[in-house]
Image (spheres, rainbow, N blue to C red):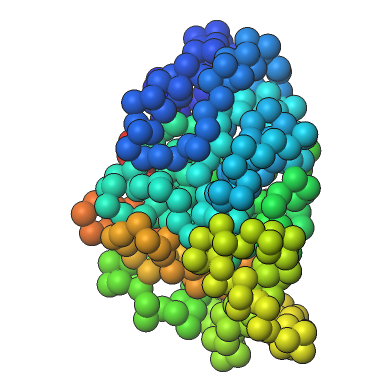
Amino acid sequence: MIPTKATIPDLRAALSSGKLTPLDVVEAHLERIRTLDRGIRGFVRVCEQGARNAAKADVHGPLRGLPFGIKDVLETGDMPTEHGSAIFEGARPRFDAAVVATLRGAGAIAIGKTATAEFAGTAPPATTHPLDPARTPGGSSSGSAAAVAAGMAVFALGTQTGGSVLRPAAFCGIAGFKPSYGLWPIAGMLPAAHSFDTIGVVARSAGDAAIIHATMMRMPEIGLPDTLPHVALCRTHLWDTLSSQGASAIEAAFKLIEQAGARTSQASLPEEFSRLTEHRAIINAFERSGNMMGLAARKDKFRKESRSVYQRGLEISGEEYVASRRALEVARASLDDVFGLAEILLAPVVPDVAPMGLNSTGDPRLQEIWSMLHCPTVTIPIGEGLGGLPLGLQLVARPFEDDLLLATARQVEAFYPEAARHLR
């Protein structure tokens, strides 16, 4: 077994049997970082000695001995937290973010801080795609996804205000999970837009994400049902933005679900949903500018993308903001109509494989729809597009049906046993 490619259940088995020690697992991942991260730049800080010390301490728990990355907008008491910004260079929090403390308490080992877009926004870090350095890995949880896809961490924490967990996970060919809004604690996270801010995880499989979710929620781990739930294909109003390969992969996945015996149907979004992106942009800019107000005296150090959203937010009136908040509340109230009899929606997650260039992290709109509506979402890889790069899908559940969502993702993931080969 190769520790840098193994899933959590396999690593648990090896640790329990004594075939591996926590220090073995940590050293294997540190070696991967030394070998690969000079080119990928997934980490902004690696905590080698701290990880070794934690491995030797061997805290027993459901995540014993598993090295994980932490997006650098989440506070860590033993490492600087710089938020991808020159303003916070060398800043040292006193405590861990709540999610970090929970994972460490469960035996997981923090191996380092992963690169983020400035303030978890749209100004990309230097991180490159693990399979093609000329392409973006997505963002803003760029380093988290690249690190996991490259075998440098078993899993990594990310944050999603629009599409910052699912998009990089889909581009990099790994699993990404965004819980229902408000389910995981966000204490110790730099606020971006508080109406949407959610902490999530990228992992080697949906099964691994389910284990992490159970740990975070202090709940029993999610079992695998005998049957699939009712799944509806929701093409969304953005279907025309998909490449032909991307659309075909989604439709093929829906066919596999149908052939596996699931009840299936078609779901459509009301016409007014096509305007949600505009409302989301208003809310996002208004709230981000408010949260950045305390940094305004040093706004000359903002990157241009951050300056732009800050200035845009200042130009939005309170009346516009409230009107957009109301429009989203109306949309959330219509979710039952969107789902109909379905329990899970199958939707596109990105238009195509990761795009060329490092000046953008890709189109967030396909992920933003569900972030705005506070739904839990998960992405898993389902095939290859241009140049053998990963393609993914998105599964969506009603708010607080996270366990059902993750169980379904595990079932669908089993249709694609070769997907993990995208891991370097």
The x, y position of residue 327, in whole percent, is 71, 86
Depth check: 163 or 125 in front? 125
Classify residue 240 as left or right of residue 397. left
Residue 282 screen position, x and y as percent:
64, 80
Residue shown at 50%/37% (left/top)? 44
Q: Residue furthest left?
A: 387
- Say above or below: 254 vs 16: below
Taking the image as shown, residue 340 lies to the left or right of residue 204, namely: right
- Residue plotted at (57% across, 16% down): 49
Identify the residue at image location x=68%, y=64%: 296
Task: Work out which quarter of the rendered image holds the N terminus and state it.
Answer: top left
For the point 46% across and 64% down, the residue is 349
Is residue 366 visible in the rendered image? The answer is yes
Quadrant assignment for the C terminus: top left
How many circles with numbers are drawn on the protein?
Answer: 0
Q: Is residue 295 above or below residue 341?
A: above
Q: Give the camera-side residue of 200 and 414.
A: 200
Residue 203: image location, x then y, percent: 52, 41
Q: Is residue 232 above or below residue 81?
A: below
Q: Quadrant of residue 76?
A: top right
| Residue 346 placement (x, y as % from top left) | 50, 66
* Residue 78 occupies quadrant: top right
**Residue 229 visible to an observer of this rendering:** no
